[in-house]
Image: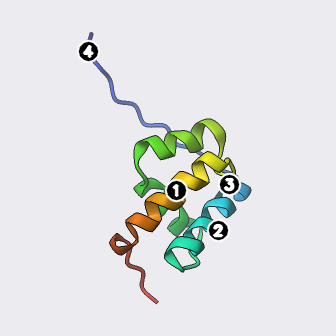
Amino acid sequence: MKKKKITIELDYSDHDLDMLHDVIIDTLGVSLNHDGILAVFESLPKHIRITAFDWGMSDTGFRDAAYVYLQEHKDQYVFEK
């Protein structure tokens, strides 16, 4: 069986993005606009993004996993002031 790669475009609510924004502020110390928040989300490992898809960004499991990942990898994120 041949595998086929598909792309799904997700539309998260403002509430979901606000939850991730809070994690970004706590870990990276920056406040980002909508596009910046989405860029950080897309940089998260697949298993964390799947948790957001399954349970939402307000879910404790997603927020905790995103927090730990961003805290451990914060030196990889550079933002212009």
Q: CA distance from mark 3 to mark 2?
A: 10 Å
For residue 22, which numbered disc appears in the image? Answer: 2
SS for tag 3? helix
For residue 16, which numbered disc appears in the image? Answer: 3
| Badge 1 vs badge 2, beta-carbon distance below 8 Å | no
Neighbour class for label 2 at 10 Å: few (<14), some, many (≥20)? some
x and y percent of residue 54 in the render?
A: 60, 35
Q: Nearer the viewer, residue 29 or 40?
A: 29
Mark found first going from the N terminus, 1 or 2: 2
SS for tag 4? loop
x and y percent of residue 30 in the render?
A: 54, 79
Q: Residue furthest top?
A: 1
Q: Tell me which corner region of the image, top left, top right, bottom left or bottom right, holds residue 63.
A: bottom right
Q: Amino acid at mark 2?
A: Asp
Mark found first going from the N terminus, 1 or 4: 4
In the depicted structure, whether residue 76 falls above or below residue 7: below
Residue denoted by label 4:
2
Q: CA distance from mark 1 to mark 2?
A: 11 Å
Q: Amino acid at mark 4?
A: Lys
Residue drawn 35% across the image and 74% down it: 75
Mark found first going from the N terminus, 4 or 3: 4
Q: Amino acid at mark 1?
A: Ala
Location of the N terminus (image quadrant): top left
Q: CA distance from mark 4 to mark 3?
A: 35 Å
Mark found first going from the N terminus, 4 or 2: 4
Residue drawn 43% across the image and 54% down it: 44
Mark found first going from the N terminus, 3 or 2: 3
x and y percent of residue 19 in the render?
A: 67, 60
Q: CA distance from mark 1 to mark 4?
A: 33 Å
For residue 30, which numbered disc appears in the image? Answer: none
Q: CA distance from mark 3 to mark 1?
A: 13 Å
Residue denoted by label 1:
66
